Amino acid sequence: MVLEFWPARRCNALNWLGLSGGVEGLSDSKAVIFDLDGTLTRPVLDFDGIRAELGLPGGPLLEAMEEMPADERARVEEVLARHERHAAANSELHDGTAEALQALRRRGVRLAILTRNSRASARTVLAKHGLDGVFSVIWTREDGAIKPSGEPVLRICERLGVAPEQTCMVGDYLFDIESGRAAGARTVLMIGDGSPPAYADQADEVIRSLGELVELVER
């Protein structure tokens, strides 16, 4: 089996693979920080397509923009903003997202969003799906440090009044896991219907749906 090398403590969410174990539970979690695109919503942004339109090589787009002269950066920001507006306007929640958020709130868990997207696109997604007021903190690229730095997770924890050790960072990409780990938070990788990526063993838990996250927190 491809995943036999995984440490057992990182696999207890993968019941569909017959694995068991896991972190010492997430039941004392007081806060959950969610990525947005691909985690709360179905993935829409096509970064390969955006880079191709801009004539840029592979690699993280935001980091590449930091090295650009002002005029080129402005052009890239305009194209990126257009794609983000389209993605936000056409966004769809993953199945069970609203129910999972409600269940966590009923348990008294504080909720936040950490995204590399713009604040405008994040607000559009939340408004479209009736999620205004659900998240106590929304951290976007305009707010300071971005994933994979651990700094935004630490700043969010400060605002929530919750220790990183009692916080879960949930996302669908390596940067989400790296950001959470750097801050000392627990990390949960959401893979949906896809195959586990090579970096999945870096996450404390791996889930296919946010309903599984609720089960981990309520365990």
Image: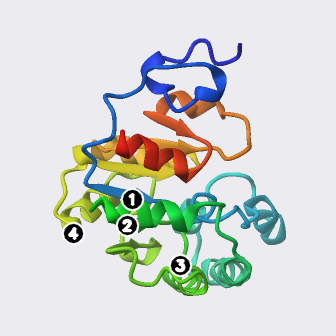
In the displayed structure, 39 sits above or below 181; it is below
**In contact (CB < 8 Å): disc 1 and disc 2:** yes
**Upstream in sequence: badge 2 or badge 4:** 2
**Upstream in sequence: badge 4 or badge 3:** 3
Tell me the residue at 66%/61% (across/down): 95
Tell me the residue at 31%/28% (across/down): 24
Q: What amino acid is labelled 3 in the image?
A: Ala
Tell me the residue at 58%/48% (across/down): 173
- Which element is circle 2 on? strand
Q: Is residue 19 left or right of residue 105?
A: right
| Frontmost residue, 185 versus 131 | 131
Residue to which mark 2 is pinned: 112
**Upstream in sequence: badge 3 or badge 2:** 2
- Which element is circle 4 on? helix
Q: Residues within 10 Å of mark 3 (few under 14, many from 20)?
A: many
Residue to which mark 1 is pinned: 33
In the displayed structure, 215 sits above or below 115; it is above
**Which image quadrant: the C terminus?**
top left
